[in-house]
Image (spheres, rainbow, N blue to C red):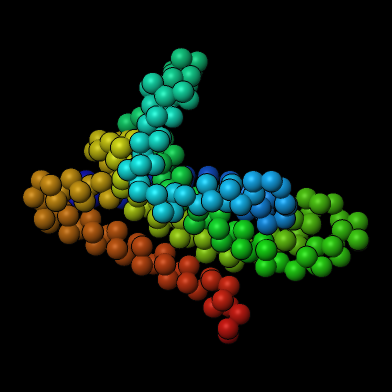
Amino acid sequence: MESAWTALALSLKVAGWATAIDLVLGVAVGYLLARTRFPGRDLLDTLLTLPMVMPPTVLGYYLLVMIGRRGWLGAWLHEQFAINLIFTWQGAVIAASIVAFPLVFKPARAAFEAVDGQLEQAARVLGIPEVAVFFRVTLPLAWRGILAGLLLAFARALGEFGATLMVAGSIPGKTQTLSVAVYEAVQAGQDDTANLLVLITSVVCVVVLLAAGRLAPGRVASR
């Protein structure tokens, strides 16, 4: 029981940090692609959406190549700052944030594209600075779609397994998240522990999905 709650706490920590990172990056990139046109825009959109369809183990391998001790970024971080991301909860956050990123980026872009540009232009005509237009006009009109995406990303990060296992491993109390703990419990034949972990994960995910469904723009418009 204690190990189950420890895994839940770690999973919530990892999912929370991953969702916060995706909030900043996903909203920024979603707004950029929704409001600007430049060569390679469609290719960039495709590359950023890849984590949604690519096997998590493949993403985990790419992360090992990049942030591993011998990776180009990982080697530099270790040499310059003595930072090691492999087999740490920070590494799990990076893996979860990459896997869940499209679930924030795509809804954010769609939400920004749905905002009436005439309202933004009217605010500019009134002399409101561009940053203020974003925070006072664009973001308030798009927040439901963005929040729904964030909830889905949180649920995805909470259940991330493949990339997390490859990058962070399964160290109890340190990097063993709920999904990894379920795998370890099944492998060890600990059915009671596995059932408890699966129940906890299922309840949390159902609650998050219900909340995301209620916030979906289509549901609001149909009422």
Tally of marks: 0
- Is 101 rendered above or below residue 79? below
Residue furthest to the left in view is 189
Q: Quadrant of residue 69?
A: top left
Residue 15 location (% of width, % of height): 42, 49
Residue 129 location (% of width, % of height): 84, 51
Residue furthest to the top in view is 79
Residue 65 location (% of width, % of height): 39, 29
Residue at 48% over, 25% down: 73
Residue 88 appearing in the image: no
Q: Indicate left or right for 188 with 79 as reference.
A: left
Q: Nearer the viewer, residue 112 or 178?
A: 112
Residue 38 location (% of width, % of height): 71, 47
Quadrant the C terminus occupies: bottom right
Residue at 10% over, 46% down: 188
Residue at 37% over, 31% down: 64
Q: Nearer the viewer, residue 96 or 48?
A: 48
Residue furthest to the bottom in view is 223
Residue 124 appearing in the image: yes
Q: Quadrant of residue 105?
A: bottom right
- Is 137 rendered above or below residue 186? below
Q: Nearer the viewer, residue 5 or 174?
A: 174
